[in-house]
Amino acid sequence: MPVSVTDPLGPAESQITFRQLADAMPQMVWSARPDGSHDYYNAQWYAFTGVPVGSTDGDGWNTMFHPDDQQRAWVRWQHSLETGEPYEIEYRLRHHSGTYRWTLGRALPVLSASDEIVRWVGTCTDIDDQKRIIERNEILSRELSHRIKNIFAVISGLISLSARRYPAMQEFVQKLQQRVAALGRAHDYVRPHSDESAPHHGPTTLKSMLKELLSPYPALDEGRLAILGDDHVIDDRGATPIGLVFHELATNASKYGSLCIPEGTVRLTSKIQSDVLLLRWEERCSATITESGRRQL
């Protein structure tokens, strides 16, 4: 939020105090006029960038960013200047070594007694090491999760090979493979992905995962299987048991319940109540279903 100040010191004393405080900070500190023209950088800025003093005044700061980040940073800065909203963005800043390092840029407007912006004061924080650690962890997480997905495929293959010795157990084997496949789909949906491998866009939510899980059932496209109610972000810990439960419910409904007749429907409703997610599976049909799944008028 904006900062409102009254200056008890004279202008010269105030400037000296500000510069002393700024140079003592471990972060890069800068300031700009109300129009966005930069007019001050502390010692850490010049130590980090290695550029001559004053060379990045005005709009020269943008040339210090990675070419792929310059337009994005400029648009974000212009938005803050026009609206007075705090400025915050991550970008790659050129280090004096010639490499680019990830940096977190922030700025707040300084207001006068009449609530007019008289200056912007900002900081740049080197976050490159943290970004690299996060990137490595994401790569490792994706690799581990990919191996888990392959384990589902191996298990399914072992079940098929073992079933050849026991022809009488084909029905049981088929059900077991369906369960393993359901777990695999649920895991694949919520596991860490790269931009290329992601099966969905945006956050992983309960409703989107259920649609993916239940997509093999024609009733979903026919509108007889409806997923309604509140949505909620879901992770891999919740996806596995939910995936198995609703696969079982959908399978039973298709064989013995409301989805085995043309007029039957299912409503899957979710509701968030006092930090608890309630799930309701409701089957409706106008006919009586026998144990064998046949319609009885």
Image (spheres, rainbow, N blue to C red):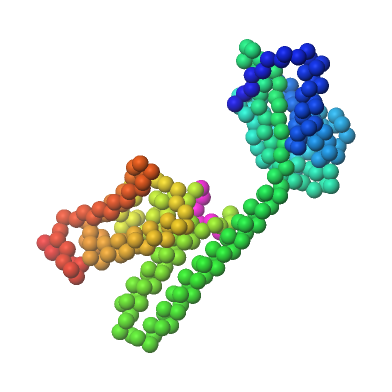
Q: Residue at x 71, y 30 (%)?
A: 122
Front residue of 262 and 177: 177
Front residue of 86 and 256: 86
The quadrant in which the C terminus is found is bottom left
Q: In the figure, 204 relative to 87: above or below?
A: below
Does residue 18 appear anywhere in the picture? Answer: yes
Image coordinates of residue 265 in percent, x first then y, are 25, 54
Does residue 68 appear anywhere in the picture? Answer: no
Q: Residue at x 80, y 48 (%)?
A: 99
| Horizontal relation, residue 224 to residue 214: left or right | left
Q: In the figure, 280 relative to 40: above or below?
A: below
Image coordinates of residue 145 in percent, x first then y, are 54, 63
Question: Which residue lies most toward the left here?
Answer: 297
Q: Residue at x 77, y 28 (%)?
A: 21
| Horizontal relation, residue 168 to residue 12: left or right | left
Question: Which residue lies most toward the right here?
Answer: 52
Classify residue 177 by image quadrant. bottom left
> What are the residue bounds of the magenta stretch?
196-202
The quadrant in which the N terminus is found is top right
Classify residue 253 by image quadrant. bottom left
Image coordinates of residue 152 in percent, x first then y, are 47, 70
